[in-house]
Image (spheres, helix red, strand yellow):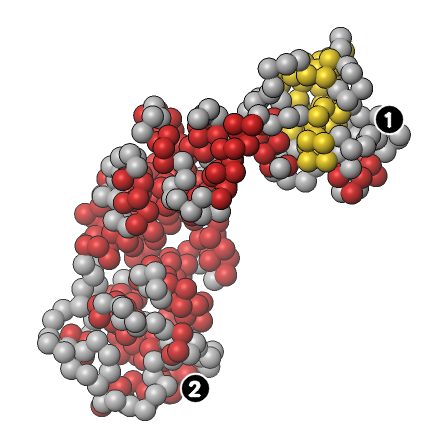
Amino acid sequence: MEQLLHYVWKHKIFPLHALSTTDGRNVQIIDVGLHNSNAGPDFFNAKLKIDDTLWVGNIEIHSHASHWNVHGHDKNVAYDSVILHVVGRADCETYRTNGELIPQLQLDCPEYVRSNYNYLSKTDVSPACYSVIKELPTITIHSWLTALQTERFEQKTATINQRVKDVNNNWEDAFFMTLARYLGVGLNSDTFERWAHKIPFRQIDKVRDDVFKLEAIFLGMAGLLDAKAEDEYMEKLQKEFQYLRHTYSLPKGIEATHWKFLRLRPDNFPHIRLAQLAFWYCKSRGLFSKVMEATSIDDLRLLLTTQTSEYWREHYIFGRPSPMRDKKLGNTAQNILVINAVIPFLYAYGIHRCNDVLCQRAGRLLEELKAENNYITRMWSAVGIDVFNAADGQALIQLQKEYCDQKKCLYCRFGYEYLRKKY
């Protein structure tokens, strides 16, 4: 109820009759104020008239007036600036810390808004607001997708900044960790990130020129060398890992049981991805700098080209030979890395360096890529949203995960259009 009152106030969905305080004074809303999502009153710098007096100050909203005291506002000087207490039910009077009475407005939510909100909150249909999508002007859709794309960039930037902090502000190490996560192809993404957090980068730099030693460390730290040796190559890796673990005091890795194989294509098996990462790390000194300087999708694809050592050309797991073939990243895997790792990293690094050129390049590259083909993009396309490129796709993923899945229709522009419609 309180969230709905916030919504009604913010969007000025007021009853047609004149508004008045609970003690009978006329209220004229000039400016509802700026919504505050942090501590303190709900809306800052509102402007209104109570009878003939102009008031400028803050607004607090509760479903019941008595919540003012329940939340301790009567003892908090931060709420002395409140000029109007907006409530769904005025079950008591409210006062500032000095004992002054605060004007109260009992605000009724229009029945059609309440009904629409109940539908959006309870329906299992997805997207719940599908019926209004085809009626929306193109500019409404475009402006909301643009805002969602920026929001997703900012969200990923916060995650990347935390990774950078975790590795003592080394952007190259954080970039490697980000690549590792998105090589996990969803099913093993979290496990790859946990594995990457275990890698002591400065210690393994000493063996960076040797793919075999890197494979031993990467597979060993992944727990994939803990079982009985399946063949001679696995046995050699086990011995090498034990030697390197002792020599460089490597930390304990993760357990093999964390990796998932069910319904996973062989090319995405952890063994193959770790072998590719080992080859990458060996051959790609300066990869981060080169990626940050790349100006085209083709340049990025070239930089993201990797393969494996000879053993993995005819194996997907230890001890089970398979037809010989190069295990390179396909276009789909490269697109996933570019969209989810490289471009967000480019944007985050641009923010870090206060470099608008990098941020703008990130946006341009995203618009040049084809959108990911997943259930989210297919679902929104089916209800009338044109998905032209990866920028649109990322915006829709943000919309689905951060708004639709969490039932935050009150904060969505599509939800707003649905709520205000009189069916």
The residue shown at (53%, 29%) is 113
| Residue nearest the viewer, comparing 246 with 256 | 256
Image quadrant in which you'd find residue 365? top left
* Residue furthest top as drawn: 52
Residue 262 lies, in percent from the top left, at 30, 71
Image quadrant in which you'd find residue 88? top right
Q: Which residue is mark 2?
A: 246
> Is residue 202 visible in the rendered structure shown here?
no
How many residues crowd mark 1 within 10 Å: few (<14), some (14–19), many (20+)? few
Horizontally, residue 45 falls left or right of residue 267, namely right
Horizontally, residue 397 falls left or right of residue 110, namely left
Residue 377 lies, in percent from the top left, at 30, 44
The residue shown at (24%, 79%) is 317
Q: Which residue is mark 1?
A: 100
How many residues crowd mark 2 within 10 Å: few (<14), some (14–19), many (20+)? few
| Residue nearest the viewer, comparing 361 with 366 | 366
- Residue 195, compared with residue 126, is above or below; it is below
> Is residue 257 visible in the rendered structure shown here?
yes
Quadrant of the drawing holding the C terminus: top left
Residue 47 lies, in percent from the top left, at 67, 18
- Residue 165, compared with residue 420, is above or below; it is below
| Residue nearest the viewer, comparing 272 with 20 | 20
Quadrant of the drawing holding the N terminus: top right
Q: Could you tell which of marks 2 and 1 lies nearer the N-terminus?
A: 1
Q: In the structure shown, which secondary structural element does the residue marked by tag 1 occupy?
A: loop
Which residue type does callout 1 highlight? Glu
Q: In the structure shown, which secondary structural element does the residue marked by tag 2 occupy?
A: helix
